[in-house]
Image (cartoon, rainbow, N blue to C red):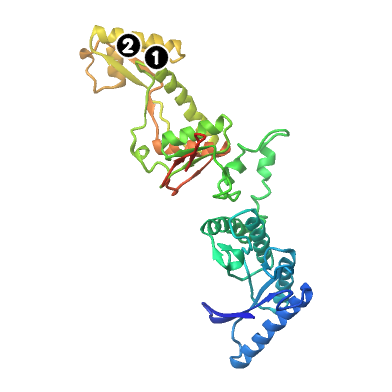
């Protein structure tokens, strides 16, 4: 039994003939004989097509499968059909014909380990055989009698890795041998922060969408979400991921004011502000992405004695936490900000760590630094539902 179909391309119609041979049923049990039979059937159809329309495009196909000699059921992903793909791939190249092979084939009835290893073996051989045209690449279950939606997603994820395998191969370009990285990193050092890593970390490896099981999922790619992702990764949590329904900073972080100050009535907030200012410098260095930090300094005005006493208390707390603040006179205020009339003010508390930054730049710096530490984030990935398990964990 052969499958004959027409496909269309920029060069017109092409005939694809694929002998479907179950070894032991429509062909002998020996793989060599079944391969020879498949080639003979294909070439007979090719010859007939040339007699009818000389020069007609033709694609040589292969769909061999072994079968269980106990039950008569076809099997997929077994060594014999895998080997036949390689042999017929060589024959197609020798004859100068394009090749059609099967894809992610399995006899399993559900999306289980059997489905995974049988599909992987059959699809991998299809790829390495040099298939030019592939059918049944995703969703195949129960020997082709049914399609599994979960299997479709699993296969599509694997096809992404095969696409990188076939599309890129081994890069041998000037940057691929990372000469500058070896010059930059001393013996016994690590390459995580090297310039070569920072240039290539986004595209160096294929990132599967299904294989990782995240211990923590951060929802929302604003400055707060990316900061959480960064800190978890920095503290050693590698199995964490951030999901953003659009682009990073597409929410409120995009139009935030970006102001920086350390004076607060709550000492914990002041301490946090002081920590954050140093943190911005760290993530800028780690990620190589500018946060747009401008430390301009700022002052807090006291228009009466009561407010002046309040600012003195705040300065005492700041000094205890290692923050540098000092009082300046109204005349000095006018020098630093000519639009202020000094006669209306009693004094001012100057904070040299006041300033501003780019909220979008800070968000991307957090996200990229988190990746350097082993975390990952996905954009255009909305969360549509969450379910809490009995053990308290969540499915997202």
Instruction: Point out which mark residue 391 bears.
Output: none
Q: Residue 115 in the image: x percent, y percent?
A: 63, 58
**The N terminus - image quarter:** bottom right
Can I make out residue 196 in this image? yes
Can I make out residue 138 in this image? no
Q: Residue at x 67, y 65 (%)?
A: 76
Q: Which residue is mark 2?
A: 311
Q: Residue furthest bottom?
A: 51
Secondary structure beneath dot 2 equals helix
Q: Residue 385 in the image: x percent, y percent?
A: 42, 45
Report which quarter residue 331 is drawn in. Answer: top left
Report which quarter residue 219 is drawn in. Answer: top left
Q: Which residue is mark 1?
A: 325
Secondary structure beneath dot 1 equals strand
Q: Residue at x 27, y 18 (%)?
A: 334
Nearer to the camera, 216 or 93: 216
Q: Residue 389 in the image: x percent, y percent?
A: 49, 38
């Amino acid at each position: 039994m052969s499958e004959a179909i027409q496909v269309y391309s920029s060069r017109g119609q092409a005939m694809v003939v694929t002998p479907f041979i179950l070894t032991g049923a429509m062909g002998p049990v020996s793989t060599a004989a079944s391969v020879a039979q498949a080639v003979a059937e294909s070439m007979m159809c090719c010859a007939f097509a040339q007699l009818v329309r000389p020069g007609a495009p033709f694609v040589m196909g292969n769909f061999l499968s072994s079968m269980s000699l106990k039950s008569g059921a076809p099997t997929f992903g077994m060594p014999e059909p895998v080997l036949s793909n390689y042999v017929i791939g060589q024959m197609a190249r020798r004859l100068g014909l394009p090749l059609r092979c099967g894809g992610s084939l399995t006899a399993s009835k559900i999306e289980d380990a059997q489905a995974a290893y049988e599909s992987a073996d059959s699809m991998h051989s299809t790829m390495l055989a040099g298939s030019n045209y592939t059918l049944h690449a995703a969703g195949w279950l129960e020997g082709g009698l049914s399609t599994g939606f979960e299997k479709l997603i699993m296969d599509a994820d694997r096809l992404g890795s095969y696409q990188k395998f076939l599309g890129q191969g081994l890069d041998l370009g000037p940057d691929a041998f990372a000469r500058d990285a070896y010059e930059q990193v001393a013996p016994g050092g690590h390459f995580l922060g090297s310039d070569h890593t920072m240039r290539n970390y986004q595209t160096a490896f294929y990132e599967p969408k299904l294989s990782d099981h995240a211990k923590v999922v951060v929802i929302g790619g604003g400055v707060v979400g990316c900061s959480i992702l960064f800190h978890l990764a920095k503290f050693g949590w590698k199995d964490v991921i951030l999901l953003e329904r659009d682009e990073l900073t597409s929410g409120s972080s995009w139009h935030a004011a970006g102001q920086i100050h350390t004076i607060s009535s709550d000492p914990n907030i002041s301490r946090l502000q002081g920590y954050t200012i140093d943190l911005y410098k760290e993530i800028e260095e780690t990620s190589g992405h500018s946060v747009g930090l401008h430390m301009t300094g700022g002052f807090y005005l006291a228009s009466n004695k009561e407010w002046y006493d309040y600012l003195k208390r705040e300065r005492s707390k700041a000094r205890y936490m290692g923050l540098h603040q000092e009082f300046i006179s109204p005349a000095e205020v006018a020098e630093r900000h000519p639009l202020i009339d000094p006669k209306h003010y009693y004094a001012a508390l100057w904070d040299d760590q006041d300033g501003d930054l780019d909220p979008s730049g800070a968000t991307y710096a957090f996200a990229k630094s988190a990746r350097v530490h082993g975390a990952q984030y996905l954009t255009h990935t909305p969360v549509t539902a969450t379910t809490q398990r009995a053990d308290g964990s969540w499915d997202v």
